[in-house]
Amino acid sequence: METLRFVINVNIAIVVLMTAAYFYQYVYTIIGLIFRKVRPEKEAYQLHRFATLICARNEEGVIGELIDSLKKQNYPSDLLDIYVLADNCTDNTARTAREAGAIVYERQNQTRVGKGYALDHLLSKIKDDKGQDAYDGYFIFDADNIVDPNFVAEMNKTFDRGYEVITCYRNSKNFGANWITAGYSIWFLREARFLNYPRMLLGNSCAVSGTGFFVSQRMIDENNGWPFHLLTEDIQFSVHCVIKGHKIGYCDRAIVYDEQPTSFSQSWSQRLRWAKGFFQVDKKYMLHLVKGVFTSPNAKMSCYDFLMTVAPCVFLVVFAIVFNLLILVSVAFQPHFLMHLIVVRTSRFLALAVVNFYIGLVIYGALTVACEWKRIKATSWQKVRYIWAFPIFMATYVPITFVALKRNVSWTHIEHNPVSKFDMLATGSQSGH
């Protein structure tokens, strides 16, 4: 009976620990549900001068669409310059970008590979050619993005409120392509509605998510360029900001449409890089975040939030599963009546863990899709159908995380496609609910 009590206590302890650690996210979810209506930002006192930065590698098929969407911004064109760095390209990305109206630089460097190095190089070129104070800040995009016409105007309003770093509402160009693209899309929509939006309302720091974010010139000067070169440079930058006491803002009405990988092999490679990047961030910053939870004067909650975001909690889940499986094997040597009790208990725990994981993510996916229904570019059937596949997409992170723990990972190119490939239902502005 001691063995049975031990099994029960360990399983209860794991459930309590996970619930307590991430309870704040349940609070975020409630806030995201209650305060769904987005109030218009106050008009900005000043129209600032900005530049957009696009680091592109072999993106001739999509780079023109992004530049075109930037040229159609509802913002004075003389206050918005478009820069492209054709990074290690072997196609006509540079020529296509120039023909579309961007200012283009080219870089060939097979040693310092990655978006972080490319951004740092592009910023140094702009500084050399335009001077250090030519712009008030920079918007950073991926080449496959499409930008809502009101994006810059809305971000300018948030910048005018005093935020030096701002992230946006990350939507998807190809939600309805398949279960993989929908899985990505639901995750990013969930991040916008149930993480960044509540963070903003509560006065906590938000998190930069890959693309469509803003960085002020003051932040670039403070960091002497862009010294963020880990595999997940966006998370590295976000954690760096929180540790330094900078609050990242969120602009819900600034929308960028991002393309998600359509094949599982490409998705595996991309998320393997992300998982490895999270381990790199853990190694470099976790102790700083722990310290910030107790000592940061204005960012204790933000430090805790980011600590939970980067912590490899999947290992605790896997530990629980392995622990119960080992118990099942070990009870073969116990008396029959005790073996039966332990098998029933552990089997029930494993079954409930799988069922709760699936149902919980279906509910989370359904809430996300329901709240963001009008903003999702897909048919009603696609929106509903892919909710049920969302838990499967998330479950694939488990093997990805374990592979990333041991494997050396480098940046790999993902092929992108023009908007017409995905038959988006609309590409016009949908800045409100």
Image (spheres, rainbow, N blue to C red):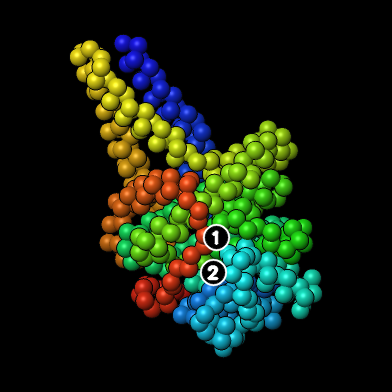
Alpha carbon distance from label 2 to label 1: 8 Å
Q: Closest to the observer: 97 or 328?
A: 328
Q: Which mark is residue 137?
A: none
User: For numbered disc 1, what is the local secondary structure?
Assistant: loop
| Residue 181: quarter of image | bottom left
Residue receiving disc 2: 142
- The residue lying at 42 percent from left, 64 percent from top is 260
- Which residue is at 74% across, 58% downward? 223
Residue 49, quarter of the rendered image: bottom right
Image: 193 above or below 75: above
> What SS does tag 2 mark?
loop
Residue 7 vertical placement versus 284 (above, below): above
Place of residue 86 in the rendered image (x, y in percent of width and height, measured from the top left): 58, 77
x and y, in percent, of residue 108 in the image: 61, 75
59 vs 362: above or below: below
Question: In the figure, 222 relative to 336: above or below?
Answer: below
Which residue is denoted by mark 1 in the rendering?
A: 210
What amino acid does circle 1 point to? Gly
* Label 1, residues with CA under 10 Å away: few <14, some 14-19, many ≥20: some
Q: Residue furthest bottom?
A: 99
Q: Position of residue 47 (x, y in %)?
A: 71, 71
Report crowding for label 2: few under 14, some 14 to 19, many 20 or more residues within 10 A (C-alpha): many
